[in-house]
Image (spheres, rainbow, N blue to C red):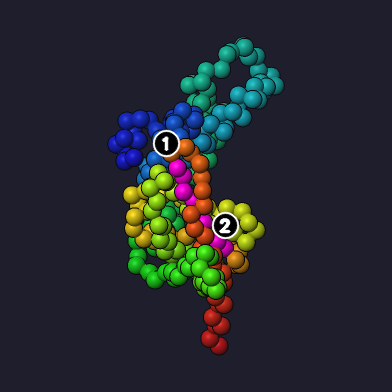
Amino acid sequence: MDHSEASRLMASEKYLLDELSPTEIEAFEEHLFGCQECALDVRAGSVFLEHGKAELANPTPKAGRVTAEVRPSRGFSWWRPAFAIPAMAILLIVVGYQNLVTFPAMKGALAENKAPRILTAASLVSSAVRGTTPSVIEVRRGEPFFLPVDIQPQSAFQSYVIELQNPAGGVQWSLPVSSESAKNTLTIQAPGMNTAGHYEVVVIGRNAQGQNLEVGRYPFDLQFARAANPEP
């Protein structure tokens, strides 16, 4: 989703009101990461919504004033002076924080992602091969790494799923793979993790009847590199 499409769909407003479909939400959230204007719209709208709820939930009039019972209007109640002034002050704080902290941090993260760097890759060996020991991969804590996976395509399967099982036996993450993609070696960039131990890459095939059958299992041990000692 680009900015023109987001503006046409009024995506910021519909996102806050939960009126977007799951697919639109995913596309808009990806767009938010690189669009300062839409990110500002969402944050500003969040401020107004939260304070609008607080204002409407506290209708007690000030002492000494005669008030008439007025049904709150969704549009104009936002701009009553008692609410609009503090809301605008908070909005200015939000804008300042974004300009000084949030947006520079986002730009730094984007620049880091675009910069070339060397990542560690695991050499995975199927557990079906007798006499093999799990591969060992050593990375810094939280650093991503590569998992090259070869799937032996079988006509019985229409698609595949690759799962990473953690030391506790749970699924750390899963990745759907089409039968066409499975014809080539898959190089998966695994997100950084904070727990060392024994992991297993599990390949699962899905047939036309919707049944899932394990195709392969690739174990490896994840270790964290020790931080270098600082020079005196």
Q: Residue 53 falls in which quadrant of the image?
A: top right
Query: What is the number of the mark on residue 23?
Result: 1
Q: Residue 5 falls in which quadrant of the image?
A: top left
Residue bearing mark 2: 165
Q: Position of residue 34 (x, y in %)?
A: 37, 48
The rendered magenta stretch, by its main secondary structure, is classed as strand
Would residue 196 be counted in the magenta stretch?
no
| Residue furthest out toward the left | 4
Magenta-drawn segment = 199-207
Of the 4 image quadrants, the one containing the N terminus is top left
Separation of residues labelled 2 and 1 (CA atoms) = 27 Å
Q: 223 or 72: nearer the eye?
A: 223
In the figure, 88 relative to 70: above or below?
below
Relative side of 81 to 185, left or right:
right
Q: Position of residue 159 (x, y in %)?
A: 41, 46
User: What is the total number of numbered labels drawn onto the structure image?
Assistant: 2
Q: What element carries label 1?
A: helix
Query: What is the number of the mark on residue 87?
Result: none
Name the amino acid, label 2: Gln
Other-residue count near label 1 (Cα within 10 Å), few / some / many at <14 / 14–19 / ≥20: few
Of the 4 image quadrants, the one containing the C terminus is bottom right
In the figure, 160 relative to 127: above or below?
above
Q: Where is residue 106 in the image (x, y as percent from the top left)?
A: 42, 54
Residue 33 in sight:
no
